[in-house]
Image (cartoon, rainbow, N blue to C red):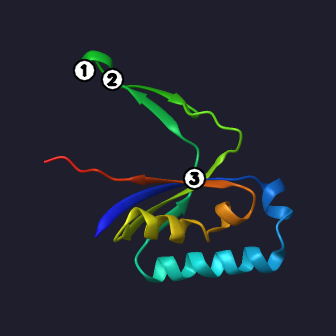
Amino acid sequence: MATFITIGYGDRAGYDQTDPAVRDEAHRHDARLRERGVVMGIAGTPTQVRNHDGAGAATTDGPYLQSELPIAGFAIIEADTLDEAVSLAARTPCAVAHGVVEVWPLQTTA
């Protein structure tokens, strides 16, 4: 089984314009994913960390990444294939509520 990281992007405007029945089913889908062991959460306020040349860590509040939509949350999904991970992500609130979800295969190093 492979591990995938998902990043969900969305905003209140897109969420509010989505049919409540569709949103409710997406939240039930998230609950089923959590029951299956998927780790997920809502994005908090980020902190950038730099340690150029190993000279000491410096931090800056706020995101480095910029997007049309704010980052709404993250998940770690175990799936047999990318297609399965995409299918799981496609039914989450960000995907159905006029947002977007990126699915990233997590490649480990030895």
CA gap, disc 2 and disc 1: 5 Å
Residue at the disc numbered 1: 54
Residue furthest out toward the front: 83
Instruction: Answer above or below: position of 52 versus 87.
Output: above
Residue 29, how many percent across, how many down?
59, 79
Q: Secondary structure at mark 2?
A: loop
Residue at the disc numbered 2: 51
Drawn side of residue 73 relative to residue 23, left or right: left
Residue at horizontal 53 percent and vertical 70 percent from the top: 87
Residue at horizontal 49 percent and vertical 77 percent from the top: 33
Nearer to us in this view, 88 or 35:
88
Residue 11, how many percent across, how many down?
75, 52
Task: Sort mark 2 into few (<14), some (14-19) or many (20+) by Cα contacts within 10 Å.
Answer: few
Residue 1, how many percent across, how many down?
28, 70
Labels 2 & 1 near each other (Cβ < 8 A)? yes
Drawn side of residue 30 relative to residue 49, left or right: right
Residue at horizontal 79 percent and vertical 80 percent from the top: 21
Disc number placed over residue 4 in the picture, else none: none
Query: Which of disc 3 and disc 2 is earlier in sequence?
Result: 3
Q: Secondary structure at mark 3?
A: loop
> Three-letter amino acid code at disc 3?
Ala
CA gap, disc 2 and disc 3: 23 Å
In which quarter of the view is residue 65 placed?
Answer: top right
Total numbered badges shown on the rendered structure:
3
Residue at horizontal 42 percent and vertical 81 percent from the top: 36
Residue at the disc numbered 3: 43
Residue furthest out toward the right: 17
> Three-letter amino acid code at disc 1?
Gly
Drawn side of residue 70 relative to residue 52, left or right: right
